[in-house]
Image (tube, rainbow, N blue to C red):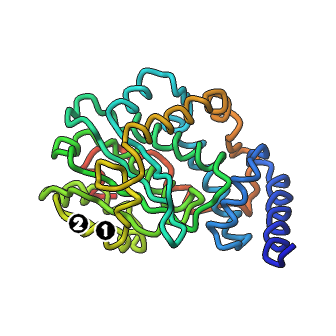
Amino acid sequence: MPDQEVENNRDLVNIKNWLCKQPHLPHDVDELLLRRFLNSCGHSLERAKRTIDLFFTIRSNAPEIFFKRDPWAPEIQRVFQITDLIPLPKKTKENYKVFIYRLNNPDLDMFNFLDAVKTFFMLADTRLTEEDDVPSGEIPIFDSANVSLKFISKINLSVLRKYMLYTQEAIPIRLKQVHVINAPAYIGKIHAICKPFIKTEVAKLIKFHEPNSDTLYSDIPQDLLPDEYGGKAGTIEELKRYWIKRIEAKRDWFLTHDQRWLVDETLRPSNCQDDRADKVRDLPGSFRSLALD
């Protein structure tokens, strides 16, 4: 067995042993997920421990996002209908996984921000616990073609804050690039809402691409994209149907894990405090409070 594999397995045993000794954390955690934490933290055991703790702490403090997740529920089915949340089948030559997220319906009256975030993380959980082929990095592409200024009024600031903290500091991935394509002239107004929650190092990864431009292809090979974007990955509908079936097949897991992956704060050791966990608390849902925060 190669030395690196021996070391990785030793790290996995160590993190499992550590987790079993944490009275406040859940112990029924998929081995694949633990490997992802170690990988995304550069096999630093201390970083992995802090990230695992924050991962479960945020989930426990965001029941509106991570509880009552039924893929068959009408609100989740509506998200499936009006959005396209698509991990693409092939990775870049650097072994990065690419995604496209977009609204396929410009009628924002049908869009619910909380339901969309909940569904977004249902897809993420499906990948985190089922895909053995762990990529070296992740590249989301947000297509804003159907995003109007009305979108600002749909944003729930409390949910946005938890979403940003979780995706930047707790979920076991390595974010490599972020692309916003078909960016309208007013995208800066929407970006300004998110900016207070974006870490400096993440902000540097974001690139905006104007409508009808081909600047995306300098970072992402066009062949990796769906047919509708001039690529060879298959149609959006085919890719989307595949992932909806994957999520729906995991229904029993979703219906049980909101109770199994809880943090019991009454059992938290005094040496396991993390200042970042304070950020999880609800933010009053007004734009005025955002400016003062």
Where residue 122 appears, as percent x and y from the top left, is 53, 39
In which quadrant of the rendered view does residue 261 lie?
A: top right
Residue 218 located left or right of residue 52? left
Nearer-the-camera pick, 235 or 33 = 235
In which quadrant of the rendered view does residue 106 lie?
A: top left
In which quadrant of the rendered view does residue 292 lie?
A: bottom left
| The C terminus sits in image quarter | bottom left
- Seen at 46% across and 52% down, the residue is 88
List the single residue furthest toward the front: 232
- Seen at 71% across and 43% down, the residue is 264
The circle drawn on residue 214 is 2
- Seen at 53% across and 47% down, the residue is 124
The circle drawn on residue 92 is none
| Residue labelled with disc 1 | 217
Where residue 113 appears, as percent x and y from the top left, is 35, 38
Q: Secondary structure at mark 2?
A: loop
Amino acid of disc 2: Asp
- As measured in the structure, the alpha-carbon distance from the residue carrying label 2 to the one carrying label 1 is 6 Å
Amino acid of disc 1: Tyr
Q: Secondary structure at mark 1?
A: helix
Residue 111 located left or right of residue 49? left
Where residue 44 appears, as percent x and y from the top left, is 70, 73
In the image, residue 223 above or below residue 215: above
Residue 138 located left or right of residue 2? left
| The N terminus sits in image quarter | bottom right
Q: Are the residues flagged by discs 2 and 1 in contact, CB closer than 8 Å?
A: yes
